[in-house]
Image (cartoon, helix red, strand yellow):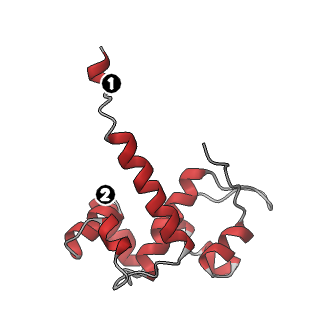
C-alpha cells in the first residue's frame, strides 16, 4: 500500500500549474467543496475530481461551462472521452498525440485506472461471495 499524500490549496495549485486564486474558480465546475479553513486539506476524492477537471480543461480543451454541461451530465470524463474522441480514457491518456506523457496528473490517473482495473478484474463480486 502506497503512502497517502496530503494536499493543500498551495500544493494543488503547484500540481496543476495555476495560482491559488485561479484554482478557486475550479471548485464549482469540478464539484469540489474546498477546505473551510486556511491550511485545510483536500481528501482523496476531491483531488481525483480536480485531476479529471484538469485533464478536461488542459488536454480535452474544454471550458469550465462545457465541463459542467457536457462531461458531468454524461457521467464523467471517461464517458465523455469515449463519446467525443471515440477511445477509452486509458488509451487517450497513453497517446502522446493527445496528452503530455510526463505530466504528473496524467501519471497519477493512469495509476488509478490500473489499480481500479486490477481490482475489478480479480473476479470477486459481492454477489458471488454469498
* N-terminal label among 1 and 2: 2
Residue displayed at 32% across by 73% down: 92
> Which numbered tag is attached to residue 126?
1
Q: Is residue 114 above or below residue 25?
A: above
From this view, report whether residue 9 is shown above or below residue 117: below
Residue placed furthest toward the top: 130
Left or right of 17, for residue 72: left
Residue 37 pos. (x, y %): 78, 57
Q: Quadrant of the C terminus?
A: top left
Q: CA distance from mark 1 to mark 2?
A: 24 Å
How crowded pointer 2 is (Cα within 10 Å; few <14, some 14-19, many 20+) is rated as few
- Which callout, 1 or 2, points to the residue nearer the camera? 1
Q: Is residue 32 visible?
A: no
Q: Quadrant of the N terminus?
A: top right
Q: Nearer the viewer, residue 129 or 28?
A: 129
Q: Secondary structure at mark 1?
A: helix
Q: Residue at x 55, y 72 (%)?
A: 26
User: Where does residue 27 sit, x and y in percent of width and height?
Assistant: 56, 67
Which residue was labeled with disc 2? 75
Residue 85 relative to residue 48: left or right: left
Q: Quadrant of residue 9?
A: bottom right
Amino acid at each position: 500500500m502506497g503512502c497517502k499524500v496530503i494536499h493543500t490549496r498551495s500544493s494543488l495549485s503547484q500540481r496543476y500549474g495555476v495560482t491559488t486564486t485561479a484554482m478557486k474558480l475550479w471548485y464549482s465546475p469540478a464539484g469540489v467543496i474546498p477546505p473551510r479553513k486556511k491550511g485545510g486539506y483536500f481528501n482523496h476524492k476531491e483531488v481525483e475530481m480536480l485531476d479529471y477537471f484538469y485533464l478536461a480543461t488542459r488536454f480535452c480543451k474544454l471550458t469550465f461551462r462545457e465541463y459542467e454541461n457536457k462531461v458531468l451530465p454524461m457521467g464523467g470524463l471517461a464517458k465523455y472521452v469515449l463519446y467525443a474522441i471515440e477511445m477509452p480514457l486509458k488509451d487517450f491518456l497513453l497517446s502522446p498525440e493527445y496528452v503530455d506523457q510526463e505530466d504528473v496528473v496524467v501519471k497519477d490517473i493512469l495509476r488509478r485506472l490500473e489499480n481500479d482495473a486490477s481490482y475489478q478484474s480479480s473476479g470477486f463480486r459481492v454477489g458471488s461471495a454469498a
